[in-house]
Image: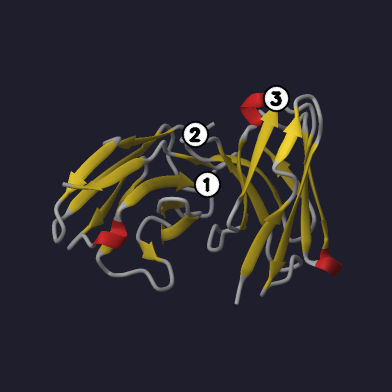
């Protein structure tokens, strides 16, 4: 059974760095990539970036200067780090398998000024 | 970036009725490999998005045949027949042909 689960702080101060973890089960990170998508409250979906099965990454150019995605295949975990947070980074952050077949439950992150 | 435009923004439907949602992309979604990576998702209240349709017209595992997708190039449609209460929520189209992948703004389906 494929599962993804996001974890991390729910409240972050502005200008600080957000660190989130996506823990997957039911598949190997060496066989499938993982995508991060976020959704501001009451708004639509924004693709943030992907870590491919070979470990390469692609980022949304709008976030590229602040964003990094890494992984630990032995722990089946993918990590998102985004620095210089602002209040408009407040959103639900989702991880999803690379064809969007399976999604995590999401984690609501609030950036406080 | 590819802009995805969905219409309508919201619509109301009677149970048992049929609806169509339109999605238009600012560029052709035909990939160099010949595939068209246009997907449809539903997001029910307080839930994560769920994949309904991928590559224009392929239903994801476990998705009812009441859902059908069609279209090509830049114009796509999702049809839902015999609407049930569990179909209510926000529908998104999304393209996976170009990076960054992008999504429409959503169509909210409500009961009439």
B21 or B46, nearer to the observer: B46
Judge from the rendering whether residue B71 lies leftward or rightward of residue A53; answer left or right: left
Q: Quadrant of the N terminus of chain B?
A: top right
* Label 3 Cα crowd, 10 Å radius (few <14 / some 14-19 / many 20+): some
* Residue under the point 49% across and 34% down: B2
Residue at image position (81%, 34%) is A17
Tell me how far mark 1 sits from mark 2, CA to CA. 9 Å
Q: Which sits in the foreground, B93 or A87? A: A87
Subunit bearing disc 2: B
Q: Residue under circle 3?
A: A86
Dividing the picture into quadrants, the one containing residue A103 is: bottom right
Discs 1, 2 touching: Cβ within 8 Å: yes
Tag 2 or tag 1, which sits nearer the N-term?
A: 2
Residue drawn 78% across and 61% down?
A: A77
Q: Which residue is mark 1?
A: B97
Find residue B52 and report its image quarter: bottom left
Q: CA distance from mark 3 to mark 1?
A: 30 Å
- Mark number for residue B2? 2
- Residue A71 numbered tag: none
Q: Nearer the viewer, mark 3 or mark 2?
A: 3
Q: Are marks 3 and 2 in contact (CB under 8 Å)?
A: no
Residue A83, image x, y percentages: 80, 31
């Amino acid at each position: 059974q494929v599962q993804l689960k996001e974890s991390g702080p729910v409240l972050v101060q502005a200008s600080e760095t957000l660190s989130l973890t996506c823990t997957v089960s039911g598949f190997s990170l060496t066989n499938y990539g993982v995508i991060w998508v976020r959704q501001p409250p009451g708004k639509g979906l924004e693709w943030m970036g992907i870590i491919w099965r070979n470990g390469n990454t692609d980022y949304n150019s709008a976030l590229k200067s602040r964003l990094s995605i890494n992984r630990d295949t032995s722990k089946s975990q993918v990590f998102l780090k985004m620095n210089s947070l602002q209040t408009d980074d407040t959103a639900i952050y989702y991880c999803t398998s690379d064809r969007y077949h399976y999604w995590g439950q999401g984690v609501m992150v609030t950036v406080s000024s | 970036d590819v802009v995805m435009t969905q219409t309508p923004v919201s619509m109301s439907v009677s149970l048992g009725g049929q609806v169509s949602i339109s999605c238009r992309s600012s560029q052709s979604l035909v990939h160099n490999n010949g595939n068209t990576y246009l997907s449809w998702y539903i997001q029910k209240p307080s839930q994560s998005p769920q994949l309904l349709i991928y590559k224009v017209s392929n239903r994801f595992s476990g998705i009812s045949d009441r859902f059908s997708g069609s279209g090509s190039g830049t114009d796509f449609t999702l049809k839902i027949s015999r609407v049930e209460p569990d179909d209510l929520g926000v529908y998104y189209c999304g393209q996976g042909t170009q990076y960054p992948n992008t999504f429409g703004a959503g169509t909210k389906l409500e009961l009439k």
